[in-house]
Image: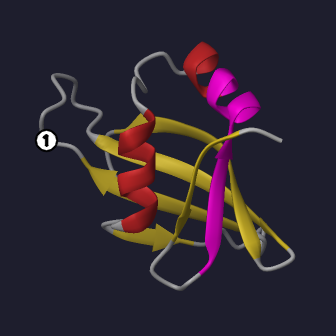
Amino acid sequence: MSYVFEVTDKSGKRIHLSQERWTHIRKKHPEVENAEELEETIKEPDKITFPKLDEKAGFYYKYFKHRPSPYKYLLVLVKYLNGEGYIVTAYYEDKIK
């Protein structure tokens, strides 16, 4: 499988973005323009939350003040499997939820 990038998050978990998922993100969320912002969000998040309904998922948030839209928080959804993570999707939000 081809990866756009693979990084280690603050907890030491390896997380990757596959080419297939990057294509999905660009198609469904065209406001997400560069993979570097996703990588930065994983490496240096402002906050990570874990949904109660899915213990194998994490929401990584990072604030990007340069965005002209009120949606300045990049949310990167990561799923964990066998001790590693993979990015499912990413999009901008107006606040951390």
Q: Is residue 88 magenta?
A: no
- Whether 27 is drawn above or below 76: the answer is above
Quadrant in the picture for the C terminus: bottom left
Q: Position of residue 12 (x, y in %)?
A: 55, 84
Report the amino acid beneath label 1. Answer: Lys
Q: Residue at x 75, y 38 (%)?
A: 2
Q: Position of residue 6 (x, y in %)?
A: 59, 56
Q: Quadrant of residue 3?
A: top right
Residue at the spot of label 1: 65
Q: Quadrant of residue 19?
A: top right
- 38 relative position to 57: left or right: left
Tell me, yes or no, if residue 96 can be seen here: no
Q: Position of residue 63 (x, y in %)?
A: 25, 51
- Whether 92 is drawn above or below 10: the answer is above
- Whether 66 is drawn above or below 11: the answer is above
Q: Name, please, the residue furthest toward the bottom.
A: 11
> Which region is colored magenta?
13-24
Q: Nearer the viewer, residue 97 or 19?
A: 19
Q: Residue at x 40, y 36 (%)?
A: 92
Q: Nearer the viewer, residue 20 or 95?
A: 20
Q: Residue at x 52, y 85 (%)?
A: 11
The 10 Å Cα crowd at callout 1, few under 14, some 14 to 19, many 20 or more, is few
Quadrant in the picture for the N terminus: top right
Q: Position of residue 54 (x, y in %)?
A: 78, 67
Q: Residue at x 48, y 61 (%)?
A: 60
Tell me, yes or no, if residue 51 can be seen here: yes
SS type, badge 1: loop
